Amino acid sequence: MQPGRWTIERIRERTAVAAVSLSIWAAPAVAVAAGQDAGEATASPWKVGIAFGYGRRSNPLIQSEDIDILIDVDVAWFGERWFFDNGDVGRTVLERDGYTLSVVGRLNSDRVFFSKTDTENVSLLANGEPDPTTSEPLEVPERDYAFEVGLELLSDGGWGFLEAAWYHDASGTHGGDELFLSYGRSFVVGRWLLEPSVSMSWKSRELNDYYWGVHADEASVVLPEHRVAAGFNTEARLAASYWIDRHWAFHVAARCERLSGAAAASPLVTERTVRGAFAGFGYHF
């Protein structure tokens, strides 16, 4: 196995964040906790795991429900150059000991919030008071998934693990860009694996405005037109796994994301902070 493949496996399994899941899986932890060496732990190109438990991710949109998480499935395949990781597909273009550079395609994750929305009739004001005889539907606009392509740099060492990436909308959905930077570190205490991480993402005006803005053809009395500028999102995450044996583990994970001020100012947004948590038992094949 080339050093680049081992690096890309262990970092992507730690830092990739799926649209709904909390990404609690870290296959190299099996090698640490169960006493396997790195070669044995990564002999197969397939990484498959499933966790059963309960979790919830808050939804910052108006008139929307939080997202329940009952099952977290992890499916990944890593070849010598090509890889698939929970919906992301990519090809490594540069391999060095300790870091890799890859071209990656993915679906933008902002769209996931728009799948849990509803319509509500809101009473309009009459002389400063709600008028029960007059109402206007409050409906969250529909948004599409965007397929984005970009470059991803992954690196790790005794100092921790790092991901830096740039993505551009290749589908023409929003036509924007995102810059992403994440740092984390692993700590092994007996059979426990603890992985805290922090990340920051800059999202362009085109991306933010498409998902969080209210466009002219969507505006109404209760939902005024609003344009959203570029901005930075920040996130902190903590994942912990207790490995019972080489296959079974107990997982807990929590994340807290802070939307940019530009996105939070949108009339579509009721909460600036997005919180998520999950606890359950997992089986790693």
Image: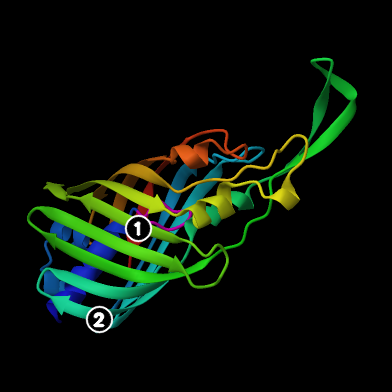
**Given the image, on which type of amino acid does mark 2 rest?**
Val
Q: Residue furthest left?
A: 158
Crowdedness near tag 2: few (<14), some (14–19) or many (≥20) residues, C-alpha within 10 Å: few
> Which residue, given by chain and number where applicable, does mark 2 sit on?
93
Crowdedness near tag 1: few (<14), some (14–19) or many (≥20) residues, C-alpha within 10 Å: some
**At which x and y percent is residue 132?**
88, 22
Q: Is residue 127 left or right of residue 90?
A: right
**Given the image, on which type of amino acid does mark 1 rest?**
Leu
Look at the image and give the residue range highlighted in magenta: 16-23
Residue 257, picture quadrant: top left
**At which x and y percent is residue 234?**
35, 43
Q: Is residue 41 visible?
A: no
Q: Looking at the image, which residue is at 26% across and 79% down? A: 92
Q: Please give the label number shown on residue 207.
A: none
Q: Count every numbered label the image shows and give the total.
A: 2
SS under mark 1: strand
Q: Is residue 61 left or right of residue 251?
A: right
Viewer-proximal residue among 72 and 184: 184
**Contact, CB < 8 Å: mark 2 with mark 1?**
no
Mark earlier in primary sequence (2, 1): 2
